[in-house]
Image (spheres, coloured by chain):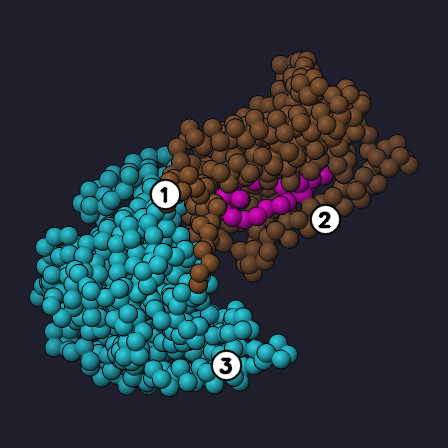
Chain colours: A cyan, B brown
Amino acid sequence: MQDSRTPAVSMRNITKVFGTIVANNKVNLDIYKGEILSLLGENGSGKTTLMNMLSGIYYPDEGEILIDGKPVQISSPRDAYDYGIGMIHQHFKLVNIFSAAQNIILGMESDQGVKNSRFGKLDIAKASKRIREICDLYGFDVDPDQKVYDMSVSQKQTVEIVKVLYRGADILILDEPTAVLTPQETEKLFNVLRNMKADGKTVIIITHKLHEVEAISDRVAILRKGEYIGDLITSETNAQEMTNMMVGREVKLNIERPEPKNVKPRVEVKNLTVRSEDGILKLDNVSFTANTGEVLGIAGISGCGQKELLEAIAGLQPIEKGEVLYVEDDGTETNLVGMDPLEIDKKGVSLAFVPEDRLGMGLVANMNLADNMMLRSFRRKGSIAGFTDRKTPRELAEKVVEELEVVTPGIDTPVRRLSGGNVQKVLVGREIAMNPTVLMSAYAVRGLDINASYTIYDLINRQKERGVAVIFVGEDLDVLLELSDRILVLCGGKVSGIVDGRTADKNGVGLLMTKVGGDAVG
Amino acid sequence: MDKQKKEPLIHITKRKMISKKSEWAIRLGSIVIALIVCAIITTITTHLNPFAVYASMWEGSFGTERKIWSLLKELSILLMISVALAPAFKMKFWNLGGGGQTMAGVLATAACMITMAGKIPNGLLIFISFVSALCAGALWAFIPAFCKAKWNTNETLFTLMMNYVATQLVAYYIIIWESPKGSGKIGIINSISEAGWLPVIGGKQYLLVVISAVIVTVFMYIYLRYTKHGYELSVVGESQNTAKYVGINVGKVIVRTLILTGLICGFVGWLLVAGTDHTMTTTIEGGRGFLGVMVAWLAHFNPIGMVLSGLLLVFMSRGAGEISTAFGLNKSFGDILTGIILFFVIGSEFFINYQIHFRKSHRKEAADV
């Protein structure tokens, strides 16, 4: 696309290689003053790497960066600030015990107006005043004296943005800023970004969510497998076209939802209360039923008790009060409370669990595919007592690699070397291979590309059709609304509602997610 | 911003994959470089011909049949302790108490030999001392393991402290059993009756120790690689969360594994007293509990690899002893050479895991013209 203006930033033929992985291959990207640019691409397409080179975290192997038409060398984040470039990373870099203002001025030199010039003394009041000015200008809501440990995720993100603006950045890069936000918080963030644009700032937002690209950006640049594919004016394109460019071929964008068949209660959770190790109430009187042949979606802001709920059912969390009843086909009920995973397994309850922490809990990162398959089967009787049967897991690993199209050099490769989507396929493949009656998954598609995500949705639907009771904890509301038969909304450890997945609307669920107190309606 | 910023001189990146061949090439290369550095230092500080020094080191280890047997004995004892530590370390239980666990076995064996000699048949005495040594070693490892499993105590400090307790106990009993009275040491136990002494097989005094080491090493190799226990302990070592998730009782695995470590260390203690030294001193273990940690780490906890890393360390220490006598050098000079070689061998791990890229200055200049 041609543009008569001089780009504020120009990246020319940028290449960056990590070991054998080419993260960016001869990428050319222009960024103009006063625009909001979306950098769209699947996980692993090199978006973050490209922006890290602009913000001084990495240094390109080849190619050059031009600012206002002049070539520059950016070899540290400080250099990037000098050129007016600031990046807000996915993982916040804040000191918890410091206040907002202390975090914002951390590491700045005295000539940048922080210290009282005469005595070289820190002048926090002056800094706070400037922070308030910035906040008023763009519509932020930050209290400079509030400690970071007292802040919500969205407030921390705001502090990160103000930190960058305080340093005089004209070009702001945000790496997947909405991943941790509710729909309402996302809207608030977008309003602030629009204010910044009106003030002449340039904003780059890294994302893989199409509706966000449509909602906020003027222009969208697309990367695929480290290569620059092209750019589009957002108002002239649509989700389908962007997806096709992102994936590189036609993809259908709707998730199927087969009608539930033969619905009967499978797991009944009654008045479940769970406290964390340090005594914080994580689940408060939670009750619901998961049925066979049905997908029960669980929505909520992250950290509202989703993890504890699944772990309590799986026997990994001490339960303070309440019951978890497993209902067999003939109606016999077994209370799983107080059992550990081994005892649950010995009771004949086939409970598959795809945890949120795939490499830290579901799999062993340093072990190869075959040994990871063995995690569920090593106790089975081998040919010699006391020895492991290594043949069956190898066969299972071969089968999972073939059926789920896992990209790996072989089944002897440690799983930490695989990409996120392939790691998840290995984990889900193993869990499904145990012929479960209950399948629980937490954030099953987090970090996965579109293809891998659809493979996972498909696997979940096949299990549902087999009559498995599926409990699906999700973070993307659009997906939850398309996949689930019923959606349970958690807010602060309480059930704030159980709604029908076919009739519920996004705003309604979004409101339930932030509802304080959460009186159950389901 | 007119100042041109320079491209950084070197980048360090983590390697994705490295072939076994280049891995060994790096290791061998590091030893060669270490030998060259040692040669330079030898020449500068002692004005000796480094090759003569190396030849003398070789001589010290492999010169005569007696020297070879004595090297094999040293290697076997060290290897068994390293192998005993391997499962604990693989489980990320930092057992620094291999020495104390061995000392517990030493004390139990000596106690049996001193108190029961002549009172029971010799075969029974050997059997009882064997069982007590194993139990004592196991107990010494069980105590810190149990506390770790139950109350998550720090195993590093705990096992370390247990070493001192064992050594002090041995010192106490040396005074109780001292012979002759007033000498402050025990001397050769049952030197006339040879009660409780292990039989010499094949006419070679150390053959039994060597055979024991082979059996223990092969057993551990199979245990770690092919058994359910071995699998469970490696899962616990890699991720306790994963272990809990698949229903492995983490505490049980910790205690079980440490008992195994203790059994082997106790066995080594038994061999030392009943098989080779026939006495008890506070230094009989000779720091092998710590040296074994290094042997195990260098071999990445692979028992077969420990044969090589153990051999390197034993060779160095015997060679160092030899050159200090042959050339009249201070004993510390041998330690300096050992230190240099270890520095390079351990340092080579960095180059196996990371890659260094230098600034491509020539091509860059060419492009600018």
Residue A20, quarter of the rendered image: top left
Q: Which residue is drawn at 24% across and 82% down?
A: A511
Whole-Å distance between the Cαs marked 2 and 1?
73 Å
Q: Nearer the viewer, residue B308 or A143?
A: A143
User: What are the residue bounds of the magenta stretch?
Assistant: B84-109
Instruction: Answer with left or right where residue A114 lies relative to residue A498.
Output: right
Residue located beneath label 1 in the image: B369
Q: Which of B150 and A179 is in front in this view?
A: A179
Disc 1: which chain? B
**B97 falls in the magenta region:** yes
Q: Residue at x 13, y 57 (%)?
A: A244
Q: How crowded is mark 3: few (under 14 residues within 10 Å), some or many (20 or more)?
A: many
Whole-Å distance between the Cαs marked 3 and 2?
59 Å
The secondary element bearing badge 3 is classed as helix
Residue B349: % across, % down = 51, 38
Q: Residues within 10 Å of mark 1 (few under 14, many from 20)?
A: few
The residue mark sitting in front, 3 or 2, is: 3
Instruction: Answer with left or right where residue B51 lies relative to residue A73.
Output: right
**Which kind of residue does numbered mark 2 sit on?**
Val
Residue located beneath label 2 in the image: B165
Q: In which quarter of the image is the N terminus of chain A?
A: bottom left
Q: Can residue B24 be seen in this view?
A: yes
Are marks 3 and 2 in one subunit?
no
Q: Can residue A292 be seen in this view?
A: no
User: Which SS type dominates the magenta stretch?
Assistant: helix
Instruction: Answer with left or right where residue A99 lies relative to residue A508.
Output: right
Whole-Å distance between the Cαs marked 3 and 1?
47 Å
Residue located beneath label 3 in the image: A127
Residues at discs 2 and 1 in contact (Cβ within 8 Å): no
